[in-house]
Image: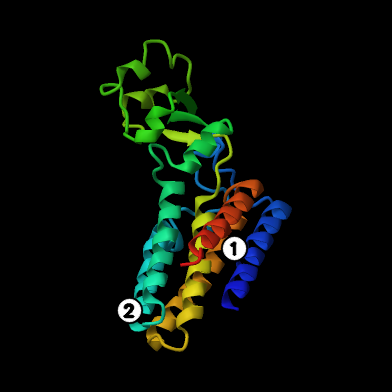
Amino acid sequence: DFRLVALILTAVAVGHGTYYSIQNSTYLDTSNPLYISQPHPLAKTYALASKRSLLNVVFLKWSWAWTTAAFLPLLFTSPIKRASRFLQWVFATSAWYILTSWFFGPSLLTRLTVASGGECGLHIGKAFVTIPHTYCVTGVPVTRASHPELFPVGRFEGVDGVDAVAAGPFVPRLLRGHDVSGHVFLLTLSALFLADQFRQTRFSAHPFALRTSGALILLWIFSLWVTSVFFHSPSEKISGFALGVACFFFSQVPL
């Protein structure tokens, strides 16, 4: 079963990458305010450790769009269970959106971060200044002029780099707490979803559609390993993987 093979490969990628990151201290705790404005310490040595890498900028930040682009040719070139396969995509997309973007306000992952001790704040100079969580929900950049209540006289006295306050704008960030790895979550969901679509259409879809989806599955598995090696704490990667698997099973409800 292609689903089982994909599940094993994604688990191995996350497991090995996480183990390697612990043994060699290669992972960056992205929820730590000390690292919010700093590049990965290994970025100059390993290109894939940089958030500006081609893999991250072109593919990972748009992973569900790429997954959808690979899914549509499978959908339209194979008539087998077309309606149910489309609903599987709808369920998977809904799970992704609810967890990462919106759930009657903040996303579920944002709510989890806050509940586990997350703090909303601004990185100003070398300081992380906490502000109300509502600013992280809206994500609107703030400046001294637009939000004077956040910059009272004397608040930044003695803060190294305080001159940066005058520059702005600053984007509120939610840090600390348990920051589930969104990349691991979505890459796991994407790889499993495409593997299932490949399984259902491998004898009927256009060969180009099958080759494209197969190549993307392999890229997502490789990306899982890269993310597990360089980013997030071990627990955040494991929880991201578990959520990805859970959301995939949610998309498999009998139709």
Q: Is residue 122 above or below residue 52?
A: above
130 and 75: which is toward the camera = 75
Q: Which residue is farthest left?
A: 145
Please state, as top left, top right, bottom left or bottom right, where the N terminus lies in the image. Answer: bottom right
Q: Which residue is farthest front?
A: 255
Q: Position of residue 231 (x, y in %)?
A: 57, 51
Q: Residue at x 40, y 33 (%)?
A: 136
Looking at the image, tell me whether mark 2 or mark 1 is earlier in sequence order. 2
Q: Residues within 10 Å of mark 2 (few under 14, many from 20)?
A: few
Q: Position of residue 218 (x, y in %)?
A: 52, 73
Q: Residue at x 45, y 28 (%)?
A: 121
Secondary structure of the residue carrying tag 1 is helix
Q: Is residue 72 above or below residue 27?
A: below
Q: Which residue is mark 2?
A: 76
Q: Which residue is mark 1?
A: 225
Secondary structure of the residue carrying tag 2 is helix
